[in-house]
Amino acid sequence: MDSITSGFMDGKAMELPCEVCGASLQTTVGEARRAAALQCPNGHPLTFDVDAFDASIRTSEQRVESIMKSFRF
Ligand SMILES: [Zn+2]
């Protein structure tokens, strides 16, 4: 079941604003959830809770999957 939901949203583009300089890091959900550390384009470390982010993405993916399962195409 994990293999079905894993990566469902990985291609989605997202941006993370830097709290120091205001520049935004352009990334994707897949990159962000796998990153050990993230930096803005000017090299500031971004405070980003990868574990919490990954958990929230998984929840979204599972929610989408359960909606998909309730329909028969
Ligand atoms: Zn910055």
Image (cartoon, rainbow, N blue to C red):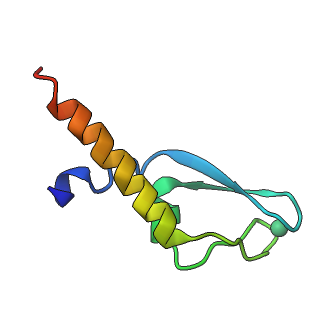
The image position of residue 22, as x and y in percent, is 86, 58
Using residue 39 as the reference point, say whether residue 66 is left or right of it.
Answer: left
Q: Nearer the viewer, residue 15 or 62?
A: 62
Q: Nearer the viewer, residue 48 or 63?
A: 63
Determine whether 5 is above or below 50 in the image.
above
The image position of residue 73, as x and y in percent, is 12, 20
Q: Residue at x 76, y 65 (%)?
A: 41
Using residue 17 as the reference point, say whether residue 67 is left or right of it.
Answer: left
Q: Residue at x 53, y 79 (%)?
A: 36
Q: Nearer the viewer, residue 41 or 17?
A: 17
> Residue pushed farthest top?
73
The image position of residue 9, as x and y in percent, is 39, 47
Q: Residue at x 59, y 48 (%)?
A: 14
Residue 70 figure quarter? top left
Give the quarter the ligand 1 occupies.
Answer: bottom right
> Residue pushed farthest right?
21
The image position of residue 10, as x and y in percent, is 41, 52
Q: How many marks?
A: 0
Quarter that holds the N terminus: bottom left
Q: Residue at x 78, y 75 (%)?
A: 43
Q: Nearer the viewer, residue 69 or 24?
A: 69
Determine whether 52 is above or below 44 in the image.
above
> Residue pushed farthest left?
72
